[in-house]
Amino acid sequence: MTASGQLPFPTARADAIDRWFARIFVAIAGLSWAGLLLAEAGAFRFGPLILLGGGIVAVGLVVIERARRRDTRNGTSTASALAVIALAGVTTAVVLPPGDPVVAGADESVYLHLASGIRRSGAILSSDPLLEETPQDDWPRLFSRDRHWPRSKVSS
């Protein structure tokens, strides 16, 4: 800052599209973060997701609205309009149906399996039949570098 309290370089103010993008981003990021946190804790349910996610989104929106009051420019820049067009193109590609995992040969089936497990149990769990059959006395050699060893149905 200079002696007069101004920044030594010009700053661009947010326009209407920038502010709406920020609001939508806060909503998506807040709900996503809350969902992942709840799934890690084994408590992924609709009620807690709405409460925690709603709280996070509310705090984020309050911060954005306070910043908006300081910045009153209402025009839309060309860069913002192009960003919205690009965002619309990306979101269109994202909502298209995914390719068949058998045809694509990637690991989509792993994510589909984990998502169905989260929906069924509310937690990020996976089942490993080979690990279940391995005696727990052999686990120190198998997981010598792991900090957090897996829990099995036998040991829980």
Image (cartoon, rainbow, N blue to C red):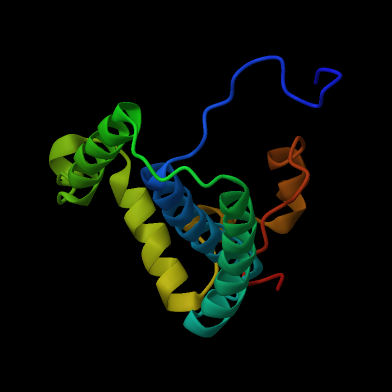
Q: As drawn, which residue projects farthest toward the bottom?
A: 47
Q: Nearer the viewer, residue 43 or 3?
A: 3
Give the x, y percent position of residue 49.
Answer: 53, 75
Q: Nearer the viewer, residue 144 or 141?
A: 144
Q: Which residue is depicted at the point 53% across and 65% down?
A: 35
Q: Nearer the viewer, residue 107 or 137?
A: 107
For this view, does 66 lie left or right of residue 145? left
Seen in the picture, residue 72 relative to 2 is either above or below; the reply is: below
Quadrant (top left, top right, bottom left, bottom right) of the C terminus: bottom right
In this rendering, the count of numbered labels is: 0
Q: Which residue is depicted at the point 22% across and 43% down?
A: 88
Q: Which residue is depicted at the point 75% across and 50% down?
A: 148
Give the x, y percent position of residue 113.
Answer: 36, 59
Quadrant (top left, top right, bottom left, bottom right) of the N terminus: top right
Give the x, y percent position of residue 56.
Answer: 62, 65
Residue 127 shows in the view: no
Seen in the picture, residue 78 relative to 61 is either above or below; the reply is: above
Q: Which quadrant of the view contains residue 116? A: bottom left
Residue 117 shows in the view: yes
Q: Which quadrant of the view contains residue 30? A: bottom right
Give the x, y percent position of residue 140.
Answer: 78, 44
For this view, does 27 lie left or right of residue 104? right
Seen in the picture, residue 93 relative to 55 is either above or below; the reply is: above
For this view, does 69 lie left or right of residue 99? right
Q: As drawn, which residue projects farthest toward the right?
A: 3
